Image: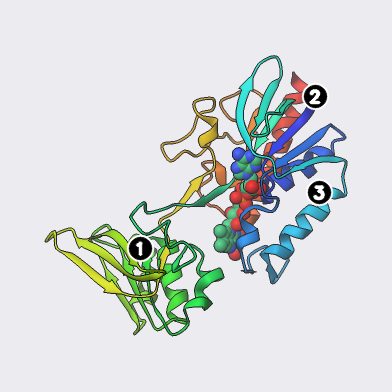
Amino acid sequence: PFDVLVVGGGPAGASAAIYAARKGIRTGIVAERFGGQILDTLGIENFISVKQTEGPKLAASLEEHVKEYNIDVMKLQRAKRLERKDLIELELESGAVLKSKTVILSTGARWRNIGVPGEIEFKNKGVAYCPHCDGPLFVGKDVAVVGGGNSGVEAAIDLAGIVKHVTVLEYNAELKADEVLQQRLYSLPNVTVLKNVQTKEITGDDKVNGIAYVERETGETKHVELQGVFVQIGLVPNTDWLGESIERTRMGEIVVDQHGATSMPGVFAAGDCTNSPYKQIIISMGSGATASLGAFDYLIRN
Ligand code: FAD
């Protein structure tokens, strides 16, 4: 069996695996998509001590660093069940069952869907989730941003510099973004902010041609013609597969303590899949290290 088995190969998982391997204990890492969200990221300028890099480049460095150590890397494998017996068992979609004394969950998160007609149908045909990746595809066009939190308002400010016009749709009566972002947003000439509206449908033929919404106060349905919709209503942790085995928040985030320990003895968690308040690369790596040291501490005490 493994001493430490890491589930997830993003910044948190890579960090956890390296910290474990450096203790000279048997370490494995299972990852559906090694690199995680950073594979979808363009510029990164807040990974401290690296002034500027690109996601795929950072992902390659993560993998290179992991390969420096004696770590059993199992790529393109998806975990589907976790159970504590005498050892902890991790079942993969392939049917294989891996056993380990400790497990570190670092399965990250993904963008939340609105769940309206047209969203799935027009994905990559006008519906986008990453302004950094897809913004340039909409040069000279009109787009909407669904969501008025920090990520939505940041996206709208970003897109306003690239596209012709941005319409922001916020469900609540007020935007939830930080004041400084709102001020910046309202200062832009090519942005319209619609508050207290519910997105009903993303319309189109072969690609997006508009968005329909209901004004919540009047109940009136309206339609705006545009070519792109950026969905920015938050991140969903990749933790559904855990079911009731581990304590999670209402949002599905794995609850961890200061050592990265979860509610299941010997199981630790790190990064965007946890209830850590901020989701960033540097934070994920730090929490990966914490969870790994937590697991090591557990091993020497049990
Ligand atoms: P993830 O990166 O999500 O990695 C999760 C890993 O788990 C992946 O390998 C995945 O394949 C795997 N996995 C998931 N489920 C399973 C399963 N069931 N079985 C096996 N493996 C599984 N942060 C910054 O600090 N700076 C930025 O500039 C920045 N820009 C961003 C831009 C975009 C477009 C996005 C999407 C994110 C950005 N972030 C940025 C956030 C940053 O990427 C995340 O905070 C970070 O990647 C989280 O790391 P993680 O290891 O916790 O999870």
Amino acid type, callout 2: Pro
Examine the rendered structure and indicate whether residue 49 appears above or below residue 62. below
Examine the rendered structure and indicate whether residue 85 appears above or below residue 192. above
- For image coordinates 43% across by 63% down, the residue present is 122
Q: Which residue does the numbered mark 2 point to in the structure image?
A: 1
Give how far across and how far down residue 59 sits, in percent.
72, 58
- Label 1, residues with CA under 10 Å away: few <14, some 14-19, many ≥20: many
- For image coordinates 76% across by 55% down, the residue present is 62
Question: In this rendering, would 258 be left or right of 293?
Answer: left
* Separation (CA) of disc 1 from disc 3: 38 Å
Tell me the SS state at disc 3: helix
- Residue 162, visible in the rendered structure: yes
Amino acid type, callout 1: Gly
- For image coordinates 42% across by 60% down, the residue present is 232
Residue located farthest toward the top when viewing the structure as drawn: 86
Quarter of the rendering occupied by the C terminus: top right
Q: Mark 1–mark 2 contact, CB under 8 Å?
A: no
- For image coordinates 47% across by 78% down, the residue present is 138
